Amino acid sequence: MATRIPPLLEPYLALPDEASLILLTSVLGASSNWLVLRYIYSVLKNQDEGEGAGVVLVSFMRDSTFWREGAGRMGLDIDHMNANGRFVFVDGLSGQISGNTTASKREKVLRSTRVNDVESEIGQALGELRTQKRVLIVDQIDALLAISEDDVTSSKLSSMILSLRERAHSTVLAMSADSPLVHSQTTMLEREHAALALGQAHGADRVLSLRMLDTGTAKDVSGVVRITSNIQGEEGGKEYLYFVASDGSVKVFERGT
């Protein structure tokens, strides 16, 4: 069974403070999937801090099967959590690929990628949770800049995020931070992506940034996770190495250990 919460990350993956914004950034070759799964696990399975808390997971890059299997390897049955009103999945991908927007009882499928429609659907999903605390996790929200049916801008997405944050106990956003998207800014999409990523990073209470090793690849290291924090009393500026095994288990360790 996959390692659940790596000890070094336990302080950062606990149920976030009320009204907090947590940002997860990733690059090609250093995906944030394992971090998203562990945030979900921490909220739903930690009975001390997570009791009375539920999760709405919105994903624009991966379908429900991916998340169900990943959670299952950690011993978390999200279908059971869904039946108990503690988990709702919003599929922002399938409707755009197949055109099928028929939702099952276990999930919601976005019928439109227009910003107003997306906000409405996510708001409804938050309302379906039967918990006191509602944690919103959005995987690859920056994909909306490329797939939305209307003229979406970083400003519109930022406004949507702010509105949704007001309805949630806390919010976790995962987005790409590859250099061409953030630093090049030669196209309108790149400029809008950079504005969204930098704006959310500026307003985040905590940022966990994933990247590849500066020296290239290594057999026993998948990448680097850097943690910066604006939370009072929380130590930031930490940087660890991590390794994601083929079975989904994760090890996080300090350099030289």
Image (cartoon, rainbow, N blue to C red):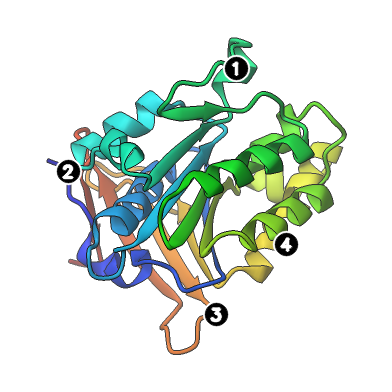
Q: Earlier in the sequence, mark 4 or mark 2?
A: 2
Q: Earlier in the sequence, mark 1 or mark 3?
A: 1
| Residue closest to the far bottom | 233
- Report the residue at 32% width, 52% height from top: 38
Quadrant containing the C terminus in the rendered view:
bottom left
Mark 4 or mark 1: which is in front? 1
Residue bearing mark 4: 199
What distance separates the C-alpha of mark 1 from that of mark 2? 32 Å
- Report the residue at 78% width, 40% height from top: 116
Quadrant containing the N terminus in the rendered view:
top left
What amino acid is labelled 2 in the image? Ala
CB of mark 1 within 8 Å of CB of mark 2? no
Q: Position of residue 97 (x, y in %)?
A: 60, 14
Mark 2 residue crowding within 10 angstroms, few (<14) / some (14–19) / many (20+): some
What distance separates the C-alpha of mark 4 from that of mark 1? 31 Å
Q: Could you tell me which secondary element the residue under label 1 belongs to? A: loop
- Report the residue at 30% width, 58% height from top: 42
As drawn, is 159 to the left or to the right of 257?
Answer: right
- Report the residue at 37% width, 55% height from top: 39
Mark 3 residue crowding within 10 angstroms, few (<14) / some (14–19) / many (20+): some
Residue bearing mark 2: 2
Residue bearing mark 1: 101
Q: Could you tell me which secondary element the residue under label 4 belongs to? A: helix
Q: Which mark is residue 230?
A: 3
Q: Earlier in the sequence, mark 3 or mark 2?
A: 2
